[in-house]
Image (cartoon, rainbow, N blue to C red):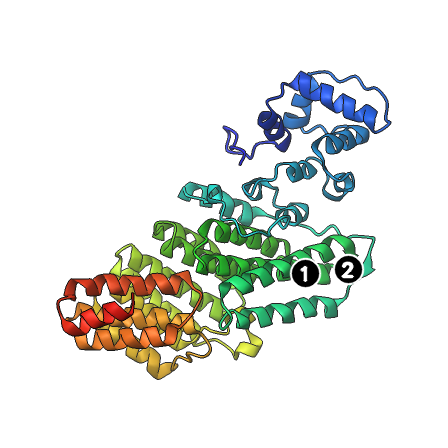
Amino acid sequence: MAKAAEDGQPIHPLTALRAREGLSAARYLARIGQAHQELGFGRVAFRREQVTRWTRNGVTPQPTTLLAMAHYHGIDLASVDRYGWPDFLHLALHDDGVVLELPWTAAGTVLSLTDLGGHVDRRTFLITPTGALGAILAQWATAEPSLALPINGRRLGTSDARLFELRLDALRHLDDTVGAEQVYQGAVFELQMIRDRIENATYTEETGRRLFAAAAEASRLAGWCAYDEGRHAAAERHFVTALRAAATAQDPTLSALVLGFWANLRYNAMKSDPRGALHLIEAAMSDRKKISSPRVRAMLHARAARAHSKAGENAAAYARIDDALAAYESAEAIEADVPALYWLSRGEIHQVAASSALSLGEPRKALDHFSAATQEDPYDTEREIRGTVIYDARRAEAHLALGELDAAVAIGHDVIDVMGGVDSARSTSTLADLRTQLRQHRHVPLVAEFLSISA
């Protein structure tokens, strides 16, 4: 990934390409001159200072020079007009980190949707410093992307956008049953189809926004599935791309949703970064009046509570649980709300409260919230096995913390029965945590038996 310039601005893609190839300005211009001739445009005389004018003074090269650059770097010549100067050069970098440096424009968003397939977890993409999060959020907050509507290709209408929305809704529900790996592949495939339609069809501004919103949701879902598989760098890349697409769709509620899921990754993975998670959540809620969904607001408060609990901040955590329950009181039927939050309920918020209490060293309060969750919303194990596994394992941990070995082991057996062949790194990790804690009591026969069958 290209490093940031000293003034904090993204490095120019031409500078990054020259640095990668180790070319001086003179040598680079000589190669562009040769490409200019190969394309049949004739000889051209470049002055060395032209590179500085292009990269620092905002000067755009001549049209034939742009085509020569594309030819030299192996970029489709049509991309010069499609993305413009200097955005088309990003296509030659082939680096996941480019997602961080693309301009927050519609063209930059389309470029960020390029080459999202594959199953490699590129750990160089991890946005480790919280300061880097701040830079991304600042760009998101000030982005004013306008759609450049295509003039060629088949005409798309709202019904076409609706088909993508319906397919994504089916994928979300399939994630509950078939597992993250297959749904990840499906989400990436949807993303590729949506990107193709954005680039190669014509549509109105309203349809365009819905297409970018669908791209944001597909990337968010891919990010969530990558996270569930334990591929945190891939997940974070998808969340950044989803935020870009939501900004291009000019949908603050969708942006807030993406930031809430990204926050979950930050406090649960990434070596647990509760401060980074809170940074994301507070950015999402900086203008909460623009968030049209009470469920999204409730989800953000719940995620903030969990982040505070990870940071050991009791009062703040419980206050945000109260805020989450209060926000949920205004929620409409899910048919009239954000479809991606079909799973959010009062019971789910109590489950988050229970997990927070457990992290804060209050197992009795955790069990009270687990009990309230069951009363509010009996968990449907056929609908969401992973959630059942995670919360039941934590409930067992609460009993264990209170010295109630019989209850802890009994729930542990239930977890194994429910888990079966579930494909989830999060669920497996939670069960592993329970087993680790139980090993301290392995001299007790019923614990020893459980450890032997759960290995």
Residue displayed at 61% across by 47% down: 112
Q: Secondary structure at mark 2?
A: loop
Mark number displayed over residue 57: none
User: Given contact means CB atoms under 8 Å apart, are the residues at marks 1 and 2 in contact?
Assistant: yes
Where is residue 214 shown, x and y percent of the image?
63, 62
Residue drawn at point x = 54 percent, y = 73 percent: 173
Residue at the far left in the pictured view: 443
> Which residue does the image show at 73% across and 67% down from the upper left?
160
**The one of 404 and 87 positioned closer to us in this rendering:** 404
Viewer-proximal residue among 116 and 351: 116
Callout 1: SS: helix
Q: Position of residue 226 (x, y in %)?
A: 49, 57
| Label 2 sits on residue | 203
Q: Is residue 211 above or below residue 174?
A: above
Point out residue 100 in the picture as x, y percentages from the top left corner: 54, 42
> Residue 211's mark?
1
Q: Is residue 430 left or right of residue 262?
A: left
Q: Residue at x 57, y 57 (%)?
A: 219
**From the viewer's perspective, is residue 398 above or below residue 381?**
above
Assess disc 1: are there few (<14), some (14-19) or many (≥20) residues with their C-alpha within 10 Å of its C-alpha: many
Residue 356 visible in rendering? yes
Give the camera-side residue of 329 and 337: 337
- Whichever of labels 1 and 2 marks the residue nearer the N terminus, that label is 2
Can residue 287 be seen here? The reply is no
Image quarter (top left, top right, bottom left or bottom right) of the C terminus: bottom left
Q: Nearer the viewer, residue 289 or 10?
A: 10
The quarter of the picture where residue 80 lies is: top right
What's the amino acid at mark 1? Leu
